[in-house]
Image (tube, helix red, strand yellow):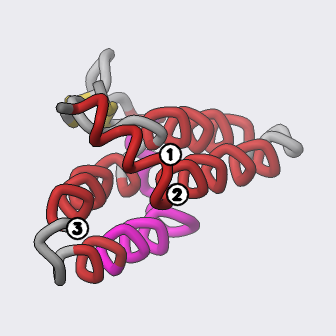
Amino acid sequence: MSLLGNILWLVFGGFLTGLGYILGGLVLCLTIVGIPFGLQSIRLGIATFAPFGKTVVPAEGGYGFLKILFDVLWILLFGWEIAIAHLIHAGILAITIIGIPFALQHLKLIPVALFPFGHELQ
């Protein structure tokens, strides 16, 4: 069932969402300071291509000072906007019965979009 969900997800917007994450990550990687954020954005883009059948888990290695600092910077610069975009998409998709599974996937991506250094989608 998750294979069918992932195929439909890609056809109806998941591909563009993942591609947006990856392109944004490549732009961030153009600067040395942006490389950690760009790599997380690319990782999010790859995870966004197939969210069905995956769960959000805490990142390996726990929370160090650097991860917390990067998460705070991410939230202030990019994360809140991405999380709001996922929330709006989830609200729009939840209007129809067919869109509810896709809305749930957008809701699942919100913690990863807010705290990419502290969460993973596995």
The x, y position of residue 1, in whole percent, is: 17, 32
Tell me how far mark 2 sits from mark 3, CA to CA.
33 Å
> In the shown orientation, is residue 114 left or right of residue 82?
left
In the depicted structure, whether residue 48 falls above or below residue 89: above
Give me the disc on residue 73: 2
Magenta span has 80? yes
Camera-nearest residue between 2 and 72 = 2
Tell me how far mark 2 sits from mark 1, CA to CA.
5 Å
Counting the numbered discs, the total is 3
- CB under 8 Å between discs 1 and 3: no
> In the shown orientation, is residue 65 left or right of residue 28?
left
Residues packed near mark 1 inside 10 Å, few (<14), some (14 to 19) or many (20 plus):
some
- CB under 8 Å between discs 2 and 1: yes
Per the image, the residue denoted by label 1 is 70
- Range shown magenta: 67-88
Quadrant in the rendering for residue 119: top left
Per the image, the residue denoted by label 3 is 99
Identify the residue at image location x=68%, y=42%. 38
Residue type beneath disc 1? Phe
